[in-house]
Image (spheres, grey):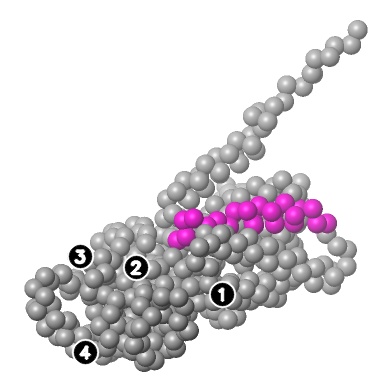
Amino acid sequence: MGANFESKYLMNKFFIKKLSIISFIFIPIIFLWHPSWLGFLGVQPYWPLFWLLPYSMINGSINGLIFGLFLGLILDSLTLDNNLTQIPGLIFCGFLFGRIKLHRDILVGHFRYGLICSFGSFLCGTLYFLQILFRNFLDINSLMFISGVKIILAEVFLTGFFAPFICSQLLRMFKFSRRELQ
Amino acid sequence: MLSNRRTSTSRWWHKKKNWILFAIFIFLVFVRISKGSFYKDLYYFISKPFWPGKFQKEIVLESIDQEHLIKLNLLKKDNTRLRRILSLQESSNNENILAAVISRKTGSWWRQIILNKGSKDGVETGYIVIGPGGLLGIVDNTSLFTSSVTLITSPESKLGVWLDRIQINGLLVGLGDDYPRLILYSKDADIKVGDFVSSSPASTLLPPNIPIGIVQSIDETFKSKKTAKISLLAKPHVIDWVQILKVNI
């Protein structure tokens, strides 16, 4: 019985310590799930930023950059466009988010997550859209431009809307996990 | 005399963390090259309890019957025309695979759906996917349990189509919104709102006469080509069950 208790304790400890990595695995699952009831104009929030912001804030720019690259690699593998990539946007966001310091005022912090994620989503969306425009340089259509801008704006709005709820919870979890680690 | 030599012999490759990160990187590159097969299969098992139920399936089958009636009339016409020409192109056979949509991206940058049938069930790249109403897209990638479909609304999609009323071939191009554009390389083409668009008998990607959509509006003639906005008969954002057609062209 003692051994059983000890193994359970060790397992719990392992899960708490690796919380950020375990949650990382679920991002592609949510990206694939793409729940339509959470959408606006058929567009979804940009899910990877919700994880990347708290992770980079706690672990710094270099870790943010590395995990931005990892996220980009996984998400690119799940989409069918072979010539377009999400990696530049996510790397840049990971690096940028790592330079942001935690704010003492909880309320300001919450709203700040929304603004930062909106900016990140705008950045990633714009970089992706520029790739599409560059690729279809010869037959750029004004309709393609309009639909691209619509997607970016809807994504920015949704990401900024959900970020305060999700990021603050994840940040709390990661902080707890880090404290356990120390 | 003080020595200038480094007292520490620590290098980046001595750190275990760096090697772990390198191993993760290699693993993720493998995932990227394999087009996320591992993740798609994992998602297959996780989403299994939430797949659409039987009730939806019956509604879909009813719609499929209606669609078949339209298709039958088109096929009769096509058959008569082809008999005259005497050089028939083989249309698809009846070996269809019924599949459920387990992931859907229809409103964002990526216009794709993932189905719960993969290479294990005999699905191959290039097979076409139809839903109640008509054509949805083409299978672009398969894993063991799943297959990813590029929708005809995707900017990646370019298909040859046929306008039955004016007997002319055109090109259907996805623009990343819900309405693909039809391009006719003839400014004199007498295209009208309400014209029916189906897959072209001359297409090398699709079997002929698969219903696709209806002309919703006609844009202004530009140089030597005419473009029109097409309203799709099959709505990818609501369809839960689809059929995968084995293509023998």
Q: CA distance from mark 3 to mark 2?
A: 14 Å
Secondary structure beneath disc 2? strand
- Mark 2, residue position: B138
Q: Nearer the viewer, mark 3 or mark 2?
A: 3
Residue lying at the far top of the rendered structure: B1
- Mark 4, residue position: B69
Q: Do the residues indicated by labels 1 and 2 lie within the same chain of the protein?
A: no
Check if residue A9 falls in the magenta segment: no
Mark 3 Cα-neighbour bin, 10 Å: few <14, some 14–19, many ≥20? few
Q: Which stretch is magenta?
A: A80-101
Mark 3 vs 2: CB contact within 8 A: no
- In this rendering, the answer to whether A25 lies above or below B94 is above
Check if residue A96 falls in the magenta segment: yes
Position of residue B203 in the picture relative to residue B53 (left or right): left
Viewer-closest of B11 and B64: B64
Question: Which amino acid type is shown beneath numbered disc 1?
Answer: Ser
Q: How many discs appear?
A: 4
Residue B150, position as x, y percentages in the image:
40, 67
Question: Which amino acid type is shown beneath numbered disc 4?
Answer: Leu
